[in-house]
Image (cartoon, rainbow, N blue to C red):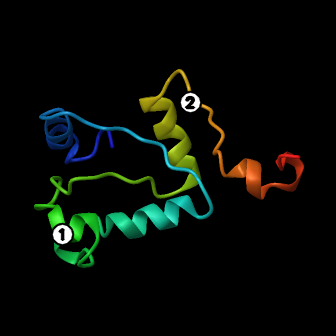
Amino acid sequence: HKGKFFYDDLVKVITASPVVAAVVEGPNAIAVVRSMVGSTRPQEATEGSIRGDYALVGLRNLVHASDAPETAAAEIKLWFPDGVVEYTRDIDRWTSEDKAPS
């Protein structure tokens, strides 16, 4: 957003308090998370969404969610320059044929 009219205000808002950065992965992760988050404009966000229930106005919309895989990749590099933690879900041992316990 650098160079856009709201950039300076955005920097003030996101540096005014602690930030929790997270990477969510899974089937349709971007669409699912954006649905949970709600519209960028809190007044248009669906009731029951994070922004619909808790956001204030404008830039103070509480949460950010990537809008595309390319955006997510750039944002992951920004927030996690050393990469994300690799993990294995325990349930995968029981639901994946090639990993099923014998």
Q: Position of residue 27 (x, y in %)?
A: 62, 62
- Most distant residue in the top direction: 82
- Using the image as rendered, state which of residue 21 and residue 59 is in the foreground: 21
54 vs 65, left or right, is: left
Question: Does label 1 or label 2 sit earlier along the sequence?
Answer: 1
Residue that badge 2 annotates = 85
96 vs 73, left or right, is: right
- Using the image as rendered, state which of residue 66 and residue 23 is in the foreground: 23
Residue visible at 46% across and 58% down in the picture = 67
The mark total stands at: 2
63 vs 34, left or right, is: left
Callout 1: helix, strand or loop?
helix
- Using the image as rendered, state which of residue 82 and residue 72 is in the foreground: 82
- Kindly identify the amino acid type of the residue bearing the numbered disc 2: Val
Q: Position of residue 72 (x, y in %)?
A: 51, 46
Residue visible at 76% across and 58% down in the picture = 95
Q: Position of residue 21 (x, y in %)?
A: 36, 38
Residue that badge 1 annotates = 53
- Kindly identify the amino acid type of the residue bearing the numbered disc 1: Asp
On screen, 29 above or below 24?
below
Q: Position of residue 15 (x, y in %)?
A: 18, 32
